[in-house]
Image: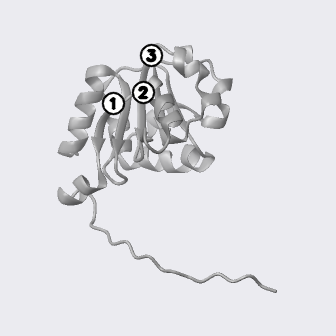
Amino acid sequence: MKLRKVQQDALDVWLSVRKGTLSMCTGSGKSRIFVEILKTKPYKNVLLVVPTEKLRDSNWKEEFEKWDAEKLYDSLDRCCYASINKKTLSDYDLICLDESHNITNNRIEQLSEYKGDILSLTATFPSKEHDEEKHSLLSSIAPEIFKYTLEQGVEEGVVAPYNITVYYIPLTLAA
């Protein structure tokens, strides 16, 4: 199956620098881009880093199955952000940081010295205005190199239109 234009554009940008964050709205195909990189590039040792065990053990496995790449999933080393410091990052030639906005200062010491390729994926790259520390942190290891907003996704028919409804519920303290 052919990549969507936005996916191909993001892939092309990442391939030109091989270190950076693809900031793309949910549903636009970030995981597909990672699978495609692994299908087309000869990486020997790949580490996938995620925030939760469910993402690590279930969700990503399903993504690889969806794109007929189960063997690639089985060949990956996987860990959660909480245990990244237990890894010797120099053993890997590609590190994929999924939901990279979850990274914290105490988890990036090794990443700041890492010389290999880094693919960072997030729908919510931290803005300088709202979280200057996290913006600086993520920018130092994987600067935002491609941005695709929810508005663009809806406009281009990549993701479904949405409505936000706010319900106000009065809260009272029980005596």
Percent position of residue 5, x then y: 17, 43
Q: Quadrant of residue 108?
A: top right
Residues under labels 3 and 2: Cα distance? 11 Å
The one of 121 and 53 positioned closer to us in this rendering: 121
Q: Is residue 128 left or right of residue 170?
A: left
In the picture, the disc for residue 142 is 2
Amino acid type, label 1: Ile
Q: Which residue is mark 1?
A: 37
Tell me if I can see residue 2 in this picture.
Answer: no
User: Mark 1 or mark 2, which is nearer to you?
Assistant: 2
Category of crowding for the residue at label 1, using alpha-carbon neighbours closer than 10 angstroms: few (below 14), some (14–19), many (at least 20): some
Amino acid type, label 3: Gly
Of the image marks 3 and 2, the number of the one nearer the N terminus? 3
Q: Quadrant of the C terminus?
A: bottom right
Q: Are marks 1 and 3 in contact (CB under 8 Å)?
A: no
The one of 123 and 118 positioned closer to us in this rendering: 123
Of the image marks 1 and 2, the number of the one nearer the N terminus? 1
Check disc 2 and report its element: helix, strand or loop: loop
Check disc 1 and report its element: helix, strand or loop: helix
Q: Is residue 13 left or right of residue 53?
A: left
Amino acid type, label 2: Ala
| Residue at image coords 67%, 32% | 83
Q: Which residue is mark 3?
A: 116
Q: Quadrant of residue 20?
A: top left
Check disc 3 and report its element: helix, strand or loop: loop
| Residue at image coords 46%, 35% | 135
- 27, above or below 171, in the image: above
Q: Are marks 3 and 2 in contact (CB under 8 Å)?
A: no
Percent position of residue 98, x then y: 48, 39
